[in-house]
Amino acid sequence: MKILRQFAEQQGPALDNIANALASGDHVLAERVAHTLKGVAGNVGATSVLPAAAALERAIRDRSNADEVERARQQVGAVLGPLVAGIRTALGAAEPDASATVQSTTSASPAQSREAATQLAALLSDSDAGAVEFIQAHRDALRPLFDATSWVEFDARVQSYAFADAQAQLERALEATAGSR
């Protein structure tokens, strides 16, 4: 349920994000959002979204004309919209994810935090999907490296398989904590 909720929340606005990126001339961002949608759709078994997202990513990458890109974007919308709506409806009765609001009752030492961060960095650099489970299992050790807002962003990046972005954020957090000692 958590993975489907995250898919709906994080990938639901993907088409708007792509349109905004294209409107501002940021083809790299638009392509990355389409690529992420394609990958996450594959990971959750959204078989109708996967080929449409792949076609959109290809159209953006190949710098197809605006009409072709818009047609590809609409094709993704035709399958993504109903899927996201169905997920939201199905999960509507489910309780919100309590783990996002529960504060940790245990604290990790700085050494434990650095060790967990080192292990996670290796998983992220290898684009290892095990990073998702690792962050859940080592949340108490990793959480002290971030302020509240940064932690939410970091967790969302890992959960949505944006491993390169998560790795960069983790490295910045480690540098900041090293500088504060």
Image (tube, rainbow, N blue to C red):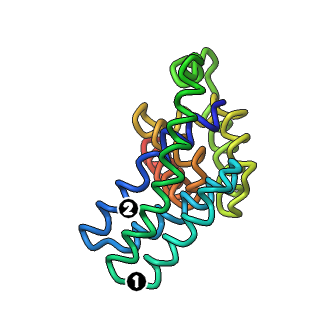
Q: Position of residue 100 (x, y in %)?
A: 54, 25
Residue 37 is left or right of residue 124, and the answer is: left
Residue 37 is left or right of residue 180, and the answer is: right
Residue 142 is left or right of residue 129, and the answer is: left
* Amino acid type, callout 2: Ile
Residue at 46%, 80% (x, y): give it.
61
Residue 10 is left or right of residue 51, and the answer is: left
Residue at 42%, 64% (x, y): give it.
73
Q: Which residue is mark 2?
A: 18
Helix, strand, or loop for circle 1?
loop
- Give the crowd class for mark 1: few <14, some 14-19, many >=20 residues within 10 Å: few
Q: Which residue is mark 1?
A: 64
Numbered mark located on residue 92 in the image: none
Q: Position of residue 157 (x, y in %)?
A: 53, 48
Q: Nearer the viewer, residue 38 or 136?
A: 38
* Amino acid type, callout 1: Ser
Q: CA distance from mark 1 to mark 2?
A: 14 Å
Which quadrant of the figure has residue 47? bottom right
* Rendered view: 137 above or below 166: above
